[in-house]
Amino acid sequence: MWKWLHPYADPEVSYHFTGRLLPWLSGLTLILLTIGLIWALGFAPADYQQGDSFRIFYIHVPAASLSMGIYLGMAIAAFTSMVWQLKLADASAAAMAPVGAVFTAIALFTGAAWGKPMWGTWWIWDARLTSELILLFLYLGVIALHNAFEDKNLAGKAAGILTLVGVINLPIIKYSVEWWNTLHQGATVSNLGKPSMSIEMIWPFIFCFSGFAFLVAMVICIRFRSEILARNSIRPWVRSLVIEHISAQSSTTTPSKENS
Amino acid sequence: MQFTSFSDFIAMGGYGFYVWLSFGVSALLIFILIINSLLGHKSVIQNIAARQKREDKLRQVRKQRAEANAPAMQSPVSIPTSTEINS
């Protein structure tokens, strides 16, 4: 397996591989999210207690679990880069951080907009909400560290240490609803043995969740490719790629100038 | 379909404001993230291209000066190093 994986540690191979992946990811995102969101907004049944405010669930829960999933991915990348000195791992961690931050913000915001009609308050210093807010600050810290150093290896190391220290927050978020008495309800979907949701609610959720997951993968791929280019800017393959790109651009914008 | 009319759909059983606020803000944030990522890719390429252009020009200037100085042997005009030109 290592022999098979090895070529993907080469920046050029990864750049082209993720480039080929992008159309598939964006196509799947578009299809799944269109179906999922229309289903969630118009066709899924309303909750017997929460009425139509329950529809926020279809964004809130995928965003929240993806915010933790992305952090886990970032932590694995940080660990890989620290142990095996894999530079691409740093690039992928730097690509994941902003995406994770946005999904954490979405989870917090939709949570607030759901909490107002259900709990009567936008915000409360409850264990689940506070630990998710700390996750947002961790993401912002990681982004800041990645941008704080001119030397990207140093930046990756500093951000990696913060990422790994912050992993402690993940189980705290996950189990906060069990460890403490909180306003936030317990797990609804992840009780795979006996899900506490009706089947008409589960299906649109699956579409929404996988749609958002592919969206996350797509955006991470785009950012990962930028990171690869920025970190390998003096390599010949990047130079020729840039020249190709610029000449393709100038030929489409100014077709009359041929010798530009 | 859970709703009988379009206005019913917008009202969301009285929770319209919160539901549409959530969906709207989420869509906006994701839209900004995607645009930012795409523009970032473009600007990285443009930055590298600009630096390449600068380096090519520097190399040309250095070559020209070297040629101009070549006939007058040991001219007092020194060829600037790359750090001098950059600063």
Image (cartoon, rainbow, N blue to C red):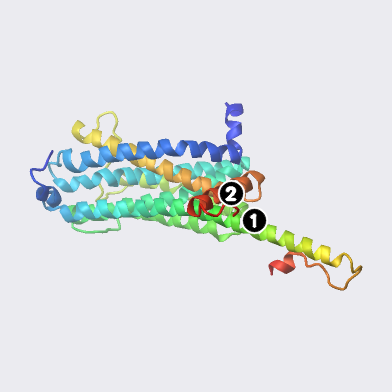
The x, y position of residue A21, in whole percent, is 46, 36
The x, y position of residue A208, in whole percent, is 29, 39
Residue type at mark 1: give it: Gln
The residue labelled by disc 1 is B52
Q: Are marks 1 and 2 on the same chain?
A: no
Q: Secondary structure at mark 2?
A: helix
Residue type at mark 2: give it: Val
The x, y position of residue A140, in whole percent, is 45, 57
Q: Is the C-beta separation of discs 1 and 2 under 8 Å?
A: yes
The residue labelled by disc 2 is A242
The x, y position of residue A188, in whole percent, is 26, 39
A208 vs A157, nearest the viewer: A208
A157 vs A33, nearest the viewer: A33
Q: Secondary structure at mark 1?
A: helix
Q: Is residue A34 left or right of residue A99?
A: left
Badge 1, how many Cα within 10 Å: few under 14, some, many 20+? some
**In which chain is the residue bearing label 2?**
A
Q: Is residue A47 left or right of residue B21?
A: left
Q: Is residue A125 left or right of residue A244?
A: left
**In which chain is the residue bearing label 1?**
B
Badge 2, how many Cα within 10 Å: few under 14, some, many 20+? many
Residue A94 vertical placement versus B81 (above, below):
above
Q: Which residue does the image show at 87% across and 73% down from the upper left?
A: B76
Measured in 3D between alpha carbons, the distance from the residue under mark 1 to the one under mark 2, in whole angstroms, is 9 Å
- The single residue placed furthest to the front in the displayed view is A256
Res A50 seen here: no
- The single residue placed furthest to the left in the displayed view is B4
Q: Which residue does the image show at 72% across and 68% down from the upper left?
A: B85
Q: Which corner quadrant holds the C terminus of chain A?
A: bottom right
